[in-house]
Amino acid sequence: LSPSPLRPTMTTCKDCDQVIKRHGLFCSMASFACESCEADLCKACFESYPLVLLGDDDTTSNSSGNDKDRLKKARIQNFCKACFQRLSVLDFETTYDVFEPSIETSERSGVTFVFVHGGGGSRAMFRPHARELTARHGHRCILVDLPGHGSLCDVELSLDTCWQELKNVMEENKIINEEDGKRTNPEEKVVYVGGSLGAYIGFYLLEEFKGIFSSAVLMDCGQNVGPGRSLKATIGLHMMSCVASHYSNKKLAKMMLDVTKKSPADQWVIESTFAAGWFFDQGKEQVSILRTIAPAKHIPELDIPICFMNGGLDHRDSEELWLNLCDTPDEVNSILKVYSGGDHFFMHDSRFVHDVLKDMHSFAVSN
């Protein structure tokens, strides 16, 4: 006998094995399925792995030009974990990417950039920038996934796990020795590059790895969100924590897409963010770290020059203070770059991309 259209049917979620009950005639209305393999998913898993796919072949766009038209047409789709990892621009078999200069086309510059992305993102955030720095100037670039993000999305996010992951990556890439933690090549210039969360965590990591980095480029960290923060920053962090606690990755990705469509950012946006995926499952931990970091405490302990980069439209209540705290003899080359008209995504704004890359290169080779 065929099942009655009025009788509930049972199935299981592909990702978490939760039993799902479908109610008769309303089965099609209640169903959540991966948009690639069509496997059944519970509502929570259905909203866990969103991606923006562009193209008839269901592959993500590896865009290299202006993304504004693509963003207008962009649609967030939902996948099971396996299909998400297959379709994302990230390789989930590794936790970092390395761009090496081509022997045929360029010589090694002696500079290694270590990129650390922002909250909710992944190592794809700086991938286009790394590609350009390697091709144009022969720099080696290493892009790291923070715990709780990208291929490390299931790893607990904390300052300790961030320290451990960066240590592992630097050991595997022969920046530091496993035995004593010291530089393997004192002549090499190693530059820490952090964006937003990666910049705030950078204040902590640069002190922990004192003597390893030659300089640092810290973007989108002009607002004090740690101890002594303003009421405005406190309210903002509270809202971030509430949203992270109650919204799914899908809803947060939709919010980010709406914000990005209104932003002047228009270059490499899809490849760097939406085609890689968003990782907000540990959003509360991200906020907790931001509340903890005290740049005014860490900066005086550093002995390297720092290039601070901020968009002119972003929150910047402490950028001058951070710069003024860089007052040791070794930090006299610290600078502040403000890109007028840029927002929190200025590094993906075609008006500034060329200058950002040029400024990063110039600062690295001169320090």
Image (spheres, grey):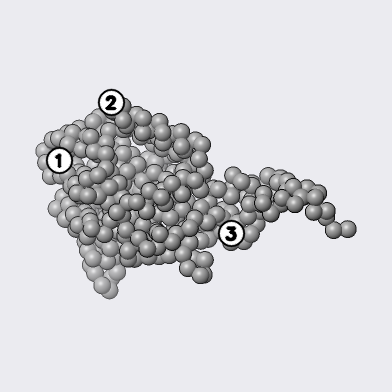
Dot 2 corresponds to which residue? 228
- Residue 288 percent location from the top left of the image: 40, 32
Amino acid type for the residue under numbered disc 1: Glu
Dot 1 corresponds to which residue? 331
Q: Quadrant of residue 166?
A: top left
Mark found first going from the N terminus, 2 or 1: 2
- Badge 2: few (under 14), some or many (20 or more) residues near its Cα, within 10 Å? few
Mark found first going from the N terminus, 1 or 3: 3
- Residue 319 percent location from the top left of the image: 20, 38
Amino acid type for the residue under numbered disc 2: Gly
Q: Is residue 56 left or right of residue 114?
A: right
Residue 56 visible? The answer is yes
Which numbered disc, 2 or 1, marks the residue closer to the eye? 2
Question: Residue at point 19% right, 46% down?
Answer: 338
| Alpha carbon distance from label 1 to label 3 | 52 Å
Which numbered disc, 3 or 2, marks the residue closer to the eye? 3
Question: Residue at point 46% right, 53% down?
Answer: 277
| Residue 95 drawn above or below residue 305 | below
Per the image, label 3 sits on a secondary structure element best described as loop
Query: Between residues 330 and 287, which one lies in front from this camera angle?
Result: 287
| Alpha carbon distance from label 2 to label 1 | 24 Å
- Badge 1: few (under 14), some or many (20 or more) residues near its Cα, within 10 Å? many
> CB under 8 Å between callouts 2 and 1?
no
Amino acid type for the residue under numbered disc 3: Glu
- Badge 3: few (under 14), some or many (20 or more) residues near its Cα, within 10 Å? some
Question: Residue at point 46% right, 45% down?
Answer: 252
Q: Is residue 115 left or right of residue 257?
A: left
Dot 3 corresponds to which residue? 35
| Residue 271 drawn above or below residue 12 | below
| Residue 246 drawn above or below residue 351 | above
Per the image, label 1 sits on a secondary structure element best described as helix
Per the image, label 2 sits on a secondary structure element best described as loop
